[in-house]
Amino acid sequence: MALLVQKFGGTSVADVQRIQAVARRIAASRDAGHDLVVVVSAMGHTTDELTGLARAISSDPPQREMDMLLATGEQVSIALLSMALHAIGVAAVSMTGPQVGIVTESAHGRARILEVRTDRLRRRLGEGQVVVVAGFQGTSSGSGGTPEITTLGRGGSDTSAVALAAALGADACEIYTDVPGVLTTDPRRVVDAQLMETVSCDEMLELASLGAAVLHPRAVEIARNYGVPLVVRSSWSEEPGTRLTSNHGRPIGNEGLELGKPVDGAELETGQAVLALSHVPDQPGVAADLFEALGAEGLNVDLIVQATHEGSSNDIAFTLDEAQLPEARRTCEALLATMGAEGAHLKAEAGMAKLSISGAGIMGRPGIAARLFDTLARGGINVRMIATSEVKVSCLVAGDQGNKALRAAAEVFELADHQLRHNPQPAALGEPAVRGVALDRDQAQVTVRQLPDRPGTAAAVCRALAENNISLDAIVQSERTHGSGDNLSRDLSFTLRRDDLQRAQQALATLLGQWPGARFEQGAAIARISAVGAGMPTTPGTAARMFRALAAAAINIEMIATSEIRTSCVVAEDDGLQALQVVHAAFGLGGTAMHRAEGTEAPV
């Protein structure tokens, strides 16, 4: 017998027939001897319909009243499903989020879970009942200590289910949806997308942050942090679906189930070198030629960044082990000679160190990167290169400042000695280099020109945006400099949600006004194509394969940003769909075309 938390999405309970089908599925699990907590979303498009009613009355309804309104959708679902279970002889009881003990912070519309008080829930389970819980909602203490209904934001039912599983110590949390599981990409865009049997929580966090909608990132964060066994399955078949794995797992602390420390580790890799090629031609194939040549020499590249520039040239920088620097330099010089790139320049530097902080969803919390850069700046540590992702932020610093940087990061993020690692060995040997590919069309590209080249500049930019709750994704610090001496400056490029573009410009206006020549510049419309895989660090040539696939399709790369398990390329918006298709094919992720079940939930 196992204790299972099962979650059914809106399409799974869209009408009476589907509710009855879900009830039969629950009854089969109950007959197999399992104790069950079942979390459900609102029926079909109920949440959208309720939101439409509110907007018809007010263009800016109070968020508290929106929570009161939207929470009713799940209450309809739980009552009907409980009735359906009773009708087939299964003892069941419905509970709202407040009734089941989900306690949240006081933030209407986007509350995070503080704790789950499971006493009432355990009593009902002990009585042999299936407990049917309204997802997406909880309760907080408002002004004067009065309980208030809160909602968790879009995708909140996933979050409710995994949080309940963590609090109960459930044997598994099963997310039932209208797709077979987690797919290698969006099957609406690539018809031969395939099911992944397993995927790590870190890989899933990257894919979810890039727009994969089959699981909400917050749910994956909880599963990762507390070691919840998580499965994504189809509501319409008995296939096993996709199993999410995690090497993590910690007790739920006093700081709050979702408000625990977002940074849970830091590491320092010494003996690093950086090579920077500036003024290379801005045309398809340049990045592919470079990294194929390096791969042919057996050179394993780590971080790669390509910044956007005015005119017809780009800068590309990358890191590798400093023992490989002489051979890498010769390879780059030979390539530049064959290109005939006028004005192209190569700069190489050994004796560097890479500092990284890791955690679940750290880029979704805008203040984390700013705190890291602020801490380094206060210690007089200049950041040479930046690489960011959903689970890791890395930066290159001078080697003689590496240990100081690691200690500073450990102090500011309250990390114990066992959470720090020096020169760690790759942990994903044998894993696929690329497990999934994602296309994100909701990003905008920004370059902040001529920022002072001194400690604290990147921190100041990130802090100003964080204070306005604006998250950055790819952050690329240019290798190209302007001016000289005390007037030396660099450009900083980044991507962010398109909806945040105007607010970002306003947030940076005062800061940029302090620096002569500094300016905010919006790039052309973009799409971002990303390859994700835990085996990427141990599989040389992965980035080169991606770049070659794009070059073969005559797709120009405007910006490159890599992290440990993700390589992202910014391309022109019109090239986005083709870029997704060619990269997916390049890594052999396709197969027999799959057909989606009837419904509307978006897969990967």
Image: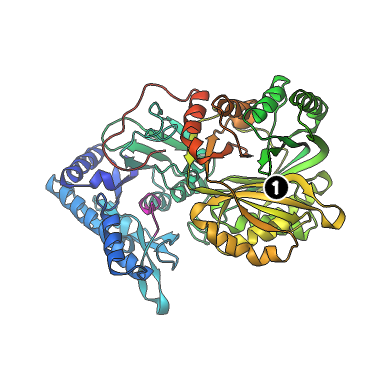
Residue 140 position by quadrant: bottom left
Residue 138 position by quadrant: bottom left
Q: Position of residue 37 (x, y in %)?
A: 30, 49
Q: Which residues are magenta?
A: 152-160
242 left or right of 384 in image: left
User: Crowding near pointer 1: few (<14 within 10 Å), some, many (20+)?
Assistant: many
Q: Residue at x 75, y 62 (%)?
A: 516
Residue 323 position by quadrant: top right
Q: Which residue is mark 1?
A: 477
Q: Is residue 309 above or below residue 145?
A: above
Q: Amino acid at mark 1?
A: Gln
Residue 57 visible within the image: yes
Residue sitting at the far top? 296
Report the front residue among 232 and 443.
443
Residue sitting at the far right? 485
Residue sitting at the far left? 87
Quarter of the image containing the N terminus?
A: top left
Q: Is residue 276 above or below residue 364?
A: above
Q: Position of residue 503 (x, y in %)?
A: 54, 62
Magenta segment includes 158: yes
